[in-house]
Amino acid sequence: MTNNKPSSLHMIARAHTDFSTKFGIPRQSALLQELTAEIVFEPPFRNPDALRGIEEFSHLWLIWEFSESAREEWSATVRPPKLGGNERRGVFATRSPFRPNPIGLSCVQLKEIRQDERLGPVLVVSGADLMDQTPILDIKPYIPYCDCMPQARGGFGQQHSTDRLTVQCDEALLQRLPQQKRAGLLEVLACDPRPSYHDDPARVYGFGFAGFEIRFRVENNTLTVCDITE
């Protein structure tokens, strides 16, 4: 029997990250371990009992909403940035945010459960690929024996997965950032925050990070930070 009753999803939490816009966000989760984020639960879900036992797991799955990419219509094919934005693939063969249901999935490491008098239990995680204020729909534990598949094939998504840029940043510029944010920023820059199909050495890019504007250019696999301003 088919149940056609519409489902009802509730936002249980929001992600608090250093990214105020989509530009600069890591292309996949779990890549940048120096980046930390906080998962703050909505008032109805701040019951500590809902997290009982979660400290036994090192990693979690976050199920979340592409809130900035939601749209009424969808396309059967998309242009993955991994392929230079020139080739089309089926939407279900990609992790494009433009989907029939704008739902994302991220694997993060649980670093700490912080107890806040006003907000209740707050999860501190690393490796999140989320914009600030992203709605979280669910949280599940990562279970290695069934979630890890070493023999799996990565398809076109595996292309350039280990590529890194050399980052040059004047120490005086870097010191404008709070010390606890510097390693995370350098990781983000090394992974090349530009769209995959951009390659203009004269172009200066900029994005928001931890309340600062980061401006940089890239030439010959070297990223040079031009300025860091509040």
Image (spheres, rainbow, N blue to C red):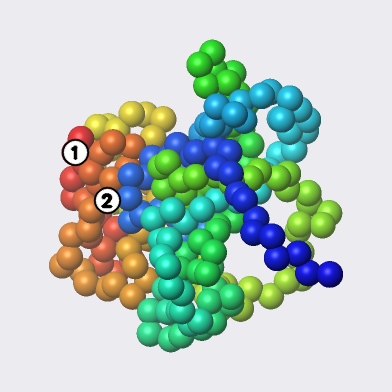
Task: Tell me: residue 129, above or below residue 159.
Answer: above
Task: Tell me: residue 111, above or below residue 72.
Answer: above
Mark 1 surroundings: few (<14), some (14-19) or many (≥20) residues within 10 A: few
Number of numbered discs visible in the structure rendering: 2
For residue 86, which quarter of the picture? bottom left
Q: What residue lies at 27% left-to-right and 73% top-to-bottom?
A: 199
Q: Secondary structure at mark 1?
A: strand
Q: Secondary structure at mark 2?
A: strand
First in residue order: circle 1 vs circle 2: 2
Q: Amino acid at mark 2?
A: Phe
Q: Measured from the top left, where is residue 101 in percent x and y?
A: 54, 64
Mark 2 surroundings: few (<14), some (14-19) or many (≥20) residues within 10 A: some
Q: Is residue 152 left or right of residue 93?
A: right
Q: What residue lies at 54% left-to-right and 13% top-to-bottom?
A: 117
- Between 222 and 63, the one lying in front of the other is 63
Q: Nearer the viewer, mark 1 or mark 2?
A: 2
Q: Which residue is mark 1?
A: 229
Q: What residue lies at 47% left-to-right and 56% top-to-bottom?
A: 66
Q: Measured from the top left, where is residue 159 in percent x and y?
A: 52, 75
* Residue furthest top in the image: 117
Q: Measured from the top left, where is residue 37 in percent x and y?
A: 49, 37
Task: Tell me: residue 15, above or below residue 160.
Answer: above
Q: Amino acid at mark 1?
A: Thr
Residue 82 seen in render: no
Specify the label residue 112 is tagged with.
none
The quadrant of the picture occupied by the N terminus is bottom right
Q: Which residue is mark 2?
A: 207
Q: Measured from the top left, where is residue 227 in percent x and y?
A: 18, 45
* Residue furthest bottom in the image: 87
Task: Tell me: residue 170, above or below residue 70.
Answer: above
